[in-house]
């Protein structure tokens, strides 16, 4: 497992645990009670895991590709992801759909999922996540176009504030031919949303 690195190159678990301990005290809890004794350690280990995208460059996943004579759309649909809203530090999660039009160079489809995960594993907002995935693919693969649609449920809206469980936010980023051509864009969206599309 990759961990969040501090400036010294390792996770500062002691500092994370002290911060959680302080937070528990600040909300009026007793960090010495049995159920909370291991909570600072558990949260520190969890944060190290869920924010491990902070110190990687997801574009690196796209650098190992291969040349093919395929110039039709490549689409990876229904990529599950989990991220943390940078405003409230509550999770948002859902599905990402990523498509591109190769210009002679393709990557293994698992690499597209890794790019989504790499950007999701950091404090985020959905709009930025969508754009980051699109830009990474556009810049690294230099395809004719990239399309990214992300749909997610945000716990900062469903468990607090507006309290509207089941609502999902949808964001999109279109680059190149997907932005210029309504036909190409429509084909992508039909493939994403038309579960029985032929």
Image (cartoon, grey):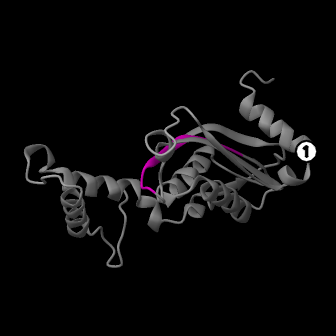
**Eyeballing the image, is 166 above or below 42?**
above
* Percent x, y of residue 99: 73, 45
Residue at 69% in and 64% down? 140
* Left or right position of 89 against 192: left
**Eyeballing the image, is 142 above or below 108?**
below
Residue holding disc 1: 182
Q: Main secondary structure of the magenta part?
A: strand
Of 129 and 90, the residue lying toward us: 90
Residue at 27% in and 58% down? 44
Callout 1: 10 Å neighbours few (<14), some, many (20+)?
few
User: Would you say residue 70 sits in the magenta stretch?
Assistant: no
User: Would you say residue 93 sits in the magenta stretch?
Assistant: yes
Inspect this view and state whether residue 179 appears: yes
Inspect this view and state whether residue 103 appears: no
Of 31 and 101, the residue lying toward us: 31
Of 78 and 21, the residue lying toward us: 21
* Left or right position of 91 against 171: left
Residue at 52% in and 58% down? 124
Which quarter of the figure has residue 128? bottom right
* Percent x, y of residue 68: 77, 49
Tally the numbered discs: 1
* Percent x, y of residue 179: 85, 53
Which quarter of the figure has residue 198? top right
Which type of secondary structure does the marked residue at label 1 adopt? helix
Segment colored magenta? 88-98
Residue at 60% in and 56% down? 129
């Amino acid at each position: 497992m990759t961990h969040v690195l501090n400036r010294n190159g390792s996770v500062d678990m002691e500092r994370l645990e002290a911060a959680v301990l302080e937070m528990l005290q600040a909300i009026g809890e007793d960090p010495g009670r049995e159920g909370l004794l291991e909570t600072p350690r558990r949260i520190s280990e969890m944060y190290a895991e869920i924010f491990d995208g902070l110190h990687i460059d997801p574009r690196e996943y796209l650098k190992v590709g291969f040349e093919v004579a395929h110039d039709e759309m490549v689409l990876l649909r229904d990529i599950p992801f989990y991220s943390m809203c940078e405003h409230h530090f509550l999770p948002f999660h859902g599905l990402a759909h990523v498509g591109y039009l190769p210009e002679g160079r393709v990557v293994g489809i698992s690499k597209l999922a890794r790019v989504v995960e790499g950007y999701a594993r950091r404090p985020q907002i959905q709009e930025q996540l969508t754009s980051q995935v699109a830009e990474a693919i556009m810049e690294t693969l230099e395809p004719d176009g990239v399309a990214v649609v992300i749909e997610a449920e945000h716990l900062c809206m469903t468990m607090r504030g507006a309290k509207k469980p089941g609502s999902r936010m949808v964001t999109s980023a279109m680059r190149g031919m997907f932005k210029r051509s309504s036909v190409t864009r429509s084909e992508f969206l039909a493939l994403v949303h038309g579960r029985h599309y032929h």
